[in-house]
Amino acid sequence: MTAAIHTFHIPVMGLGFTIDSPAKVAQYGISSVISLVDDGLIEKMRELYCRHQDKDFHPISDKIDDFRAKRITAYLNLMDDVVREKFEAVRNSVRTNRAEMEKYLAMLPSQSEIRQKFHDLREEYGHGKAWEWVQEHISPGKIDVNIMTKVDKANYRGKEKLPNEYSDAHAALRGFAQSKLESSIVLSAGMNPRLYGYMENFEDFFPDESGHLKKKITLKVSDYRSALIQGKFLAKKGLWVSEFRIESGLNCGGHAFATEGYLMGPILEEFSTKKDILKKMLFKTYRKGLEKNGYDIPEKPFDIQITAQGGVGTAEEHQFLQDHYDVDSVGWGSPFLLVPEAVSIDAETIRLLQNAEEDDLYLSGISPLGVPFNNVRGNTKDIEKMQWIASDRAGSPCPKKYVQFDTEFTEKPICTASRQYQYLKVQQLNEQDLDPVAYQKAYDEIVEKACICVGLGTSALLSNDLDTTKEGGGVSVCPGPNMAYFSKEVSLDKMVDHIYGRDNVIQRQDRPQMFIKELSLYVNYLKDQIADNPDPDDEKQQKYFSKFRENLLAGIEYYRNLFSDLDVYFQSRKSELLEALDRFEEELSLLVPEQGVLVN
């Protein structure tokens, strides 16, 4: 794989928003990530692109053996073909009107070596030599894929439970491993030992005779300790982690995996200072893993990239993460939901996001996984859900069945967002002797769950004029809090110019700095946790709250030193940033009296 052309990437968003992003942006050197959760959506998109590319489409029925893996392999192979064809068209535009090649060059980082070399050659030898050189030195963006490791539902043939390798995440992994892609699989949502062990079955994850890794592993992590534990687990099997993708616990989109008050700045600092140590430790274990599996041992470790994402919104923040923490790439997610050239999103959802303000973006309990989930008020999936509740038919018909994990009422797992589960749960609730306030609270918690399996993919169907009869038209969308500061639809090149500081698409003047925003989210999160769990006699709970607070205070002190020492980045806003830290420190002091007992 060639070196990255850009210093940003587009992370996975929902199940469908980035389902075909590589076909939209990879020809310009921009990498993006496809979700592998919904093989039904993937099959529909494969049919669409076969039609667009004038290729024969042979449907893969859900009645055949291993259909899920086969659908994923077929789609990824098609995406690879589409990207290669589009990229060749960009390269060959040098011989025609050069418009596409000029667009490619115009979007490169201002300090790009390719961009600078082009200008130097043009000055010395003229346009012909310059264009010829560029044509041979550009490369497409990567077609990476994502698997949520815990979304690994067992599957059945009739009443017979199939072996583990046919579970959802295992089949998705196999679909990627058997494709012709040379790219990375991004594993998120924590460690799944059984899934990690299954990777040993595929040679593409091991070095070939020339020492090349055709398939690479990226772990999405929230802290250094998690990276070390998971990295060692894989290294013991001869599997190298090529990238650790650090994501803010709360200042991000999708599911939110809050840390115990560990903030992004200190986390990145630890990765920055310990990266070489991490590489040496993992390589020591990796050598033994390769030897165990009968592979040649490389003389030196493969590279490890450190990337970051979650709440980045300005060119200054982007550049700071690169300069100070030496991150290899910065993930820009939510802002790209307003770039239909880059994602599959319907017009109504774009309008909703354009008008969303801070209070419209909130951490919800709608996910059937039981993990806090970023949501936006007024989305059409929630409207659809409320209509079902109003008609006394709470819950979804559950057409996709990807998060069927609950066995409270049934032997075979069902989904907590399903009509079946919510009916049974409400019946159980009706048998309890609760006062009206307690009853309503319990009822609201039951029916809050939404069918995000469907909702997070529907926008791709709507934006591509595909049939939504089975899914319905409700769209779930899960932007991070940063979405509040982006308020207009923009073109791909304009958003890229914003990232690199050549333009500005943020109209508001009150956007908080990314670290301050994350800190505010964590302080409010702690307050909510205390309010929901106020028992002062619960020793374990109080210990958790105290540790959470200590970590936040340590993070504040880290930021106080950071903002004071690095004038080149923070001079213009230093007083504002330090005042914000003082304010949050004072708020935290009110949460814990000196005697050590937490109060609300």
Image (tube, rainbow, N blue to C red):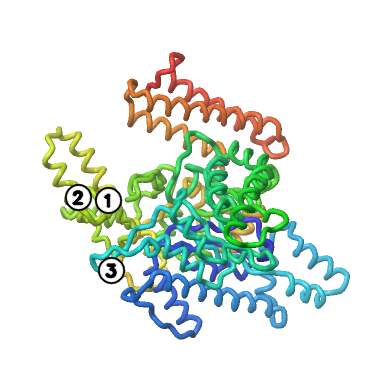
Could you tell me how many numbered marks the image carries?
3
**Placement of 16 over or under 595, stated as above or below:** below
Q: Secondary structure at mark 2?
A: loop
**Residue, disc 3:** 157
> Taking the image as drawn, is residue 72 in sight?
yes
Question: Which quadrant would the N terminus be assigned to in this image?
Answer: bottom right
C-alpha gap between disc 3 and disc 1: 19 Å
**Placement of 429 over or under 52, stated as above or below:** above
Marked residue nearer the N-terminal end (3 or 1): 3
Residue 362 falls left or right of residue 447: right
Picture coordinates of residue 72 (x, y %)?
45, 70
Check residue 329 in the rendering and tell me which mark sits there, or answer none: none
**Residue, disc 1:** 406
Q: Residue at x 39, y 49 (%)?
A: 375
Q: What residue type is disc 2 on?
A: Phe
- For marks 3 and 1, give the one nearer the viewer: 3
> Taking the image as drawn, is residue 315 in sight?
no
Residue 581 falls left or right of residue 173: right
**Residue, disc 2:** 409
Q: Secondary structure at mark 3?
A: strand
The image quadrant of residue 353 is bottom left
Q: What residue type is disc 3 on?
A: Arg
Farthest top residue in view: 595
Marked residue nearer the N-terminal end (3 or 2): 3
The image quadrant of residue 8 is bottom right
Picture coordinates of residue 481 (x, y %)?
47, 45
